[in-house]
Image: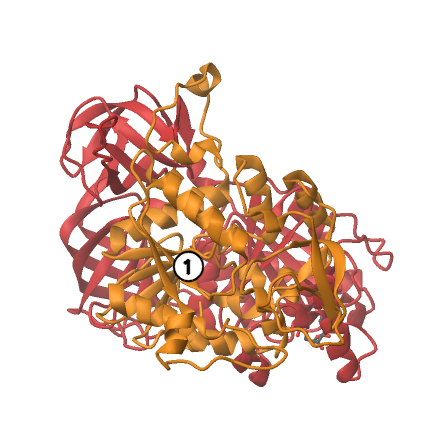
Amino acid sequence: MNTETTLALEKQPLSPEAITSRVQANALENEAIYILREVAAQFERPVLLFSGGKDSITLVRLAQKAFYPARIPFPLLHIDTGHNFPETIAFRDELVNELGVELIVRNVQDSIDQGKVVEETGKYASRNTLQTTTLLDAIEEFKFDACIGGARRDEEKARAKERIFSVRDDFGQWDEKNQRPELFDMLNGNIEIGQNVRVFPISNWTELDVWSYIQKEGIDIPSIYFAHERETFLRDGLIWSAQDDIVFRAEDEEVESRWVRFRTVGDMSCTAAVESHADTIDKVVAEIRDSKISERGARIDDKRSEAAMEKRKQQGYF
Amino acid sequence: MEVLKIATAGSVDDGKSTLIGRLLYDTKSLTEDKLEAIRKSSEKKGYDYLDFSLATDGLVAEREQGITIDVAHIYFSTPTRSYIIADTPGHVEYTRNMVTGASTSQVAIILIDARKGVIEQTYRHFFINNLLRVKDVIVAVNKMDLVGYSEEIFNDIRENFELLNEKSTYGEQRLNYIPVSALKGDNVAARSENMPWYEGETLLEHLEKLEIADVSDKSKFRFPVQTVIRPKTEEFHDFRGYAGKIYGGDLKVGDEVTVLPSLKTSRIKEIFFFDQTFDKAGAGSSVTLTLEDEINITRGDMLVKTDELPRVEKEINAIVCWMDNKQLRPGTKYIVQHNTNSVLSKIDVIRNNIATDFSGVLEANNQLGLNEIGEVQIKLSKPIFYDDYTENRSNGAFILIDAHTNATAGVGFING
Ligand SMILES: Nc1nc2c(ncn2[C@@H]2O[C@H](COP(=O)(O)OP(=O)(O)O)[C@@H](O)[C@H]2O)c(=O)[nH]1
């Protein structure tokens, strides 16, 4: 793990050039840090939604920067689908340990066991939509008033109109027609009891911006983001992991070993891999730069319908 | 990488979506799967061309109505810089969205349909960019293919626009006219063979070369404190850092600063960005500052250089753009959010309504309705520390929040 993650606790000796230099303003980074500080100042119970993916790992780094030399002043919340890549979970635990932040985990499996949601079945079964219930329950349980997430506007069309502070009602619903205008960089976090705000500090970043930042900062990310050999099978032109039992595979879907990496690390059952030999961050960045398939193209749940994301968001999906 | 933020506005059907889609296509920012979706959809509608407008259309409701209804953000990049487009519709009922888009942008593209020329909506787009002091305005005369790529028509439109520009209140604004066909691609990224008479830059060339004019760079140092950082660890036992973003000006270690409202003075001891300290910092940096002296500072306070004090008043005049369904009336109370400072306020006088077509001031009718703009006098329960909007965009603007609904009900540009 990167040694920089422990700096919240130790003072670094300053290099000579650092002493005579000028803060180099990276517009996107400055903006994200500004937003995170507004969250800490305007809300009483913020939480950072941590999926173990590269976007939320980037958020954690930005939060470290925003509050240094203090610790990150809010806990991390992981909604565990139970379908995570084992690499992601191991990574999460190590990161939390080094940062000394509080980690809260709530399980979709518990929501299923309590009969609050019903597991999907069939070929395209996924727990992605089930997460919503578990998330809303956790928000209520801890009375979170601001949930910081790593969504980006370039990911998907419906997200393009999402605000940086996005107010949700008691049911977690998003009313896209009644959003608050966001002028200059002023963020209005005034809410009523029962409402909460979803906050997107890296709204304006593109996938490439995130990858370049990870490269520049030397941030550690889970190994599944890098090319590795994996047992896989093909379906609908996409590559799926056959290594674990979580992804449903029909008998006629043949298992084959391929060199792949993942571009997102959502629920394993709806996260397809891409063929790749990019096994270092530099190679990944180069590959993304030339890439012609958008990130969410590899997520089956969005392909279900064009309006899929929008509908899920209205229901409280992150 | 540098980021250039662009606001686009145009009337329905002027070709705004097509132009943006074309920019994405020509800069190879459309991914294979998005391009495929556009191909399929264009085919389904029976077009013999690619309908790039589909690259940007967002929400379901919009698809149903076939128009854009909010601010959409679109991203593309070239090896030179990253671009963010805030796209807003052009009708009068979307004035507030245009104001919102312009507030975060450094450049505006005003689209004109070559067949229609300068129309009422053009006036409004330009007026808003004047009011918000967007430094660079590009007038893109679109659909040149439908007017035989006529130089004369282009020149006529330019002349009409220049007449409008004479009424501008913002003399330093930079205007550029570019004849384009968004559909065919003329002068968007590729130079047009159909308009040899045009010798200027293509739209993309212009955006690539544009000097990112940060108005605030020339303005004075303003540092609204967002939050106070007190680690309370053994190592940083007495550490007290003031976290915020620099609005305008430059700061060096050793500079003498005054804290508002207490008027206490001290010197900058350290400038932190994450775990490094620096000698200097400029506008836009999200830094943490420490001072030589222990002073009681909280969120909402502001650090400024001692010889550059801002105005500190309990009564302000501002041009307000109203954004709420409930009208703004004298005697009503709102929360003024100015930087990190929130104060209760009372609307004193609504002096006038300002026409958004440069025709001047309308008679005061003592209220501002949704999308209306007017000069307002506001009384504050506590003083704020501000500059005129024309001197510092960030420190001269505020929002009005309805204390009952929590809605962002309006935006103000201070002018005294
Ligand atoms: N001939 C021609 N048609 C255009 C041009 N730009 C846009 N259009 C067409 O004008 C119509 C409206 O364009 P659209 O981009 O949807 O306009 P918007 O409402 O401003 O976003 C569509 O049918 C476009 O194909 C152009 O440069 N030339």
Residue B302 picture location, percent across and down: 24, 39
Q: Of residues A275 and A21, which is closer to you in this image? A: A275
Q: Is residue B373 above or below residue A66?
A: below
Q: Residue at x 34, y 24 (%)?
A: A11
Ligand 1 is found in the corner quadrant, namely bottom right
Figure chain in orange:
A
Q: Residue at x 55, y 77 (%)?
A: A308
Q: Residue furthest top?
A: A16
Q: Amino acid at mark 1?
A: Ile
Q: Of residues A93 and B395, which is closer to you in this image? A: A93
On the rendered image, what quadrant is the N terminus of chain B found in?
Answer: top right
Q: Of residues B396 and A153, which is closer to you in this image? A: A153
Q: Of residues B341 and B231, which is closer to you in this image? A: B231
Q: Residues within 10 Å of mark 1 (few under 14, many from 20)?
A: many
Let me know if residue B358 appears in the view.
Answer: no
Q: Residue at x 28, y 77 (%)?
A: B326
Residue B168 picture location, percent across and down: 49, 54
Chain B pictured colour? red
Q: Which residue is mark 1?
A: A164
Q: Is residue A138 above or below residue B231?
A: below
Q: Is residue B354 above or below residue B12?
A: above
Let me know if residue B48 appears in the view.
Answer: yes
The secondary element bearing badge 1 is classed as loop
The disc numbered 1 marks a residue on which chain?
A
Residue A239 picture location, percent across and down: 71, 64
Residue B287 picture location, percent across and down: 36, 35
